[in-house]
């Protein structure tokens, strides 16, 4: 299904599975040309076979700045443009008391979650023209905290701050920067965090909808943010009306979740029965 993404180039890291794969499929279905990366070669190849078109792919570690620079250079050499960047590569946490963590564990999370976002954003910036957009991946643990996840929380809180600062830095160039901060999403990487039926059921009790979110629902939001056009406002919303909407309405005086849902439905980015347990932070210039 072609759309206004036809002819636009979208770079996605962490595309071998989960949210990254779902977003690649979504953007391909909307007509975008894809440049995909991951460290998982078999998974990346599988994503490629699932996507419409013929995505460009590269296997590398986003924690290595030279590799990020080389990939962006290759994208520009092949396509001559770069319109959208989705920084999705990340490492999920293991519950450790801080005294049980190691330097290697700290470096692994920081290098992928934070340094990878920094590396790819820095590499892409010189090539982004007015109307381009970046979406970074934070987490529900980038806006709240949990014991035994201090290092992971630090990386995801940092991404929120990085995103806000980059939105201000690039806003004057008409380039938008946003972050999605998913909660518990049913993905292969989260299976290691919430393992077993009992653990899943326990987490689902905390979710207003009574279920984990899906990677496709997050992909809907990413595509919405890439498509979105506007000027001069900042908005922070949790798209889960049953859980947070009253607080949002008290702050803003308007039903923002419903308004955003309506826009997404009219844009063809959201089905009428989809519920989104995901935060996003948005800044438009």
Image: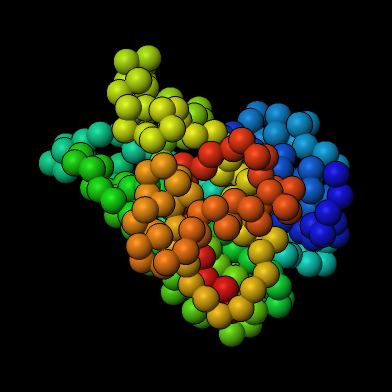
In the image, farthest residue toward the top: 197
Q: Is residue 19 above or below residue 68?
A: above
Whole-percent x, y for residue 165 in the image: 44, 74
Can residue 182 be seen at all in this image of the molecule? no
Figure disc tally? 0
Left or right side of 220 for 242: left
Q: Name the residue: 71% across, 43% down.
A: 26
Specify the quadrant of the image occupied by residue 172.
bottom right
Q: Looking at the rendering, in which quadrant would you find the C terminus?
A: bottom right
**186 and 153: which is toward the camera:** 186
Q: Name the residue: 52% across, 42% down.
A: 276
Q: Is residue 136 above or below residue 212?
A: below
Q: Name the residue: 41% across, 28% down.
A: 210
Q: Looking at the rendering, in which quadrant would you find the N terminus?
A: top right
How is colour applied across the structure in the image? rainbow
Left or right side of 253 for 144: left
Q: Name the residue: 70% across, 34% down.
A: 47
**242 and 203: which is toward the camera:** 242
Can residue 139 be seen at all in this image of the molecule? yes
Whole-percent x, y for residue 31 in the image: 83, 50
Whole-percent x, y for residue 129 in the image: 71, 76
């Amino acid at each position: 299904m072609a759309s206004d993404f036809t002819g636009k180039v979208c770079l996605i890291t962490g595309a071998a599975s989960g949210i990254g794969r779902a977003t690649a499929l979504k953007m391909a279905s909307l007509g975008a040309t894809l440049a995909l990366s991951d460290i998982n070669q078999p998974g990346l190849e599988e994503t490629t076979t699932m996507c419409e078109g013929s995505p460009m792919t590269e296997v590398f570690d986003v924690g290595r700045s030279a590799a990020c620079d080389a990939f962006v250079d290759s994208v520009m050499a092949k396509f001559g443009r770069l319109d959208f960047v989705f920084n999705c590569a990340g490492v999920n946490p293991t519950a450790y008391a801080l005294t049980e963590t190691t330097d290697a564990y700290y470096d692994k999370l920081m290098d992928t979650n934070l340094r990878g976002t920094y590396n790819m954003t820095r590499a892409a910036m010189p090539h982004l023209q007015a109307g381009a957009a970046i979406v970074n991946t934070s987490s529900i643990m980038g806006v709240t905290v949990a014991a035994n996840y201090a290092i992971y929380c630090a990386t995801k809180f940092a991404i929120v701050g990085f995103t806000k600062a980059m939105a201000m830095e690039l806003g004057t160039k008409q380039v938008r920067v946003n972050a999605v901060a998913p909660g518990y999403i049913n993905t292969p990487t989260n299976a290691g965090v919430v393992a077993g039926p009992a653990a899943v059921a326990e987490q689902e009790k905390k979710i207003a909808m009574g279920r984990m979110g899906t990677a496709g629902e997050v992909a809907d939001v990413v595509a919405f943010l890439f498509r979105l056009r506007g000027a001069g406002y900042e908005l922070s919303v949790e798209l889960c009306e049953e859980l947070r909407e009253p607080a949002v309405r008290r702050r803003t005086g308007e039903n923002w979740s419903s308004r955003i849902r309506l826009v997404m439905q009219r844009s063809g980015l959201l089905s009428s029965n989809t519920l989104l347990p995901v935060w996003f932070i948005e800044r438009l210039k």
